[in-house]
Amino acid sequence: MSVVHVQTPGGNYPIQVAPGRLDLMAESIPSDATTLALITNPTVFALYGERVLQALNTTGKKVVQILIEDGEQYKNGKTLDVIFDGLLQNRLDRKAVIVALGGGVVGDISGFAAACFMRGIRFIQVPTTLLSQVDSSVGGKTAINHPLGKNMIGAFYQPIAVEIDIHVLKTLPKREISAGLAEVIKYGMITDADFLDWCLANTDALNALEDEPTQYAVTRSCELKAYVVSQDERESGLRAILNFGHTFGHAIEAGLGYGKWLHGEAVGCGMIMAAELSAEVCGLSAQSVQKIRDLVAAIGCPTEPPKWDHDKWIDLMGLDKKAEGGQLRFVLLPELGKSVVQTVDVATVKKVLAKF
């Protein structure tokens, strides 16, 4: 087992990575927990629900189940109320613990529910997609979507543990693997060029979900994210670099409608666009831009964005959380493994959009 320790002002907790962690869930349940609320969707429950229930039942605690709809389009206020209904109907108290079993949608909305219910109860992330294992389950970002913007309503709220079973990835569709690998390679682009080169050399093994490379990729990604989050829990500075490719990616998601492209697919394509913008603004080499394009293609993510007019792009990106005072802010790469956050004028952004 690999263990990554996250240390933030909002809480310290372990990320435990290994095959078979689903069966050892009881190890993360606090001894003073009263009720355990398992929040998941029917798709994940059919695959892993009984295993997790069996593990949770060994604690001797009362366990209740709350099922929510499956899909990004359901990460909204209506689904949040479904969770609150379940928590209230089962009379959960302040010592209850939420267990979020699923991908980013389940983790994000369950974490937000935990942050709000009785002004905050404990929760555990049990991510079942590669994207959620290396990104959304780590760092305490919780949220729901609004029709006018993705993740615009939420809270920074840390879990008490993250349990990652790499074998659950074997039931994922190929698109989900590609989407998760987009976030994996992102960490190399923004912080660790050596890791990026390792990803390039191990693309086939990662696509095939071989145990050793997968565990290393997940663990290294969590280590890099944990370091950034420990320095800047609430994204007032350094943490913003984790959004490389996301300004373009979130625009793609919002413009197409949530769920049309997977989040990681949109980010993968967005990283190519951000690389081209980095070349224009920061002088990122053409060779490095091509390396990013090649790697995004190798993991199976789209490399060409929707063919919208420039004004639509600018309008969609203006809704992004990183926009400030009407200025568009981007994470840019002066070179591979190094990143900066800066505003870019609209004319320059349109010049880059013209390349696509």
Image: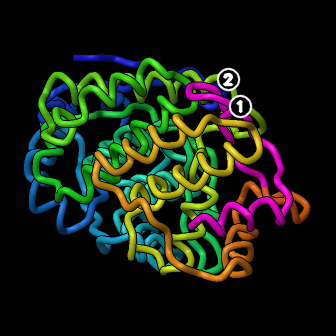
Q: Nearer the viewer, mark 1 or mark 2?
A: 1
Which residue is at the far right?
325
Kindly indicate the quadrant of the structure image that contains residue 236. Answer: top right
**Which residue type carries mark 1?**
Leu
Question: To which residue does mark 1 refer?
Answer: 238
Image quadrant where one finds the C terminus: bottom right
Q: Which segment did they paint magenta?
A: 329-356
Element marked by disc 2:
helix
Q: Which mark is residue 231?
A: 2
**Which residue type carries mark 2?**
Gln
Kindly indicate the quadrant of the structure image that contains residue 300. Answer: bottom left
In the depicted view, which residue is nearer to us: 19 or 276? 276
Residue 183 shows in the view? yes
Give percent across and percent down for residue 67: 27, 68
In the depicted view, which residue is nearer to us: 288 or 114? 288
* Residue positioned 34% across, 51% down in the render: 297
Q: Is 351 in the magenta?
A: yes
* Residue positioned 56% across, 47% down in the render: 141
In the depicted view, which residue is nearer to us: 28 or 216? 216
Q: Looking at the image, what colour scheme do you see?
A: rainbow
* Residue positioned 67% across, 74% down in the render: 313
Q: Are marks 1 and 2 in contact (CB under 8 Å)?
A: yes
